[in-house]
Amino acid sequence: MDADDNYLENSLETFFIDMIFKYQGFSVMAEFADKRVVHNPFGSTDFDFRSSLVDANGRSYYTGQGINLQTSYLLQNNIELATRYSRIMPDTEVSFAGINEYTFGLSKYVVGHNLKVQADVSLIDKTGASHNKLRYRLQTEFAF
């Protein structure tokens, strides 16, 4: 079996699930993802599910889990307040052990989703980092 044959025996698999609930201006959204490398080095039917970053041929894969949770409320004047929590949990520490991100957002819908202005601020907490970072975003969207 050469390297090309072995390449066919490994695969990157992702499990993803999400949900959204909306009721009278209030919404809740949740997402979860899990990414794994499936090793089958000898072509057998017995698969070995591992959380490896590098396969036998030296190819790199980023694996781990991630979650994203968001709640928002749309006021009668078409201003929306939102909070979001995101977490990335890599299986193997690469340049970081994990990230927690806390976000507060504000949106103004001028013409539905066709014309809107959005702003948010996020606190980014990298596990093991000496300090946290702030990220600011301002976005205008036009759709025709």
Image (tube, grey):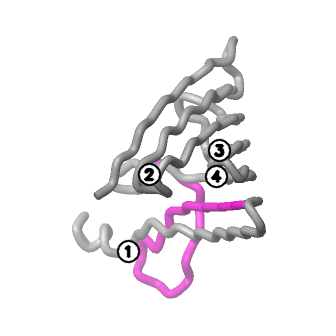
* Label 3 sits on residue: 79
Q: Nearer the viewer, mark 1 or mark 3?
A: 3
Foreground residue among 75 and 46: 75
Residue 34 included in the magenta stretch of the image: yes
Residue at left offset 72%, top offset 68%: 22
Residue ranking furthest to the top: 130
Disc 2 to disc 4, C-alpha distance: 15 Å
Residue at left offset 62%, top offset 20%: 134
Given the image, on which type of amino acid does mark 1 rest? Glu
Residue 11: horizontal and vertical position, in percent?
42, 69
Residue 107: horizontal and vertical position, in percent?
59, 41
Q: Earlier in the sequence, mark 1 or mark 2?
A: 1
The answer to whether mark 1 and mark 2 are in CB contact below 8 A is no
The answer to whether mark 2 and mark 4 are in CB contact below 8 A is no
The answer to whether mark 4 and mark 1 are in CB contact below 8 A is no
Among the 4 quarters of the image, the one containing residue 9: bottom left
Given the image, on which type of amino acid does mark 4 rest? Gly
Numbered tag placed on residue 66 in the rendering: 4
Q: Nearer the viewer, mark 3 or mark 2?
A: 3
* Label 1 sits on residue: 9
Residue 46: horizontal and vertical position, in percent?
56, 83
Give the magenta part as a residue range: 28-53
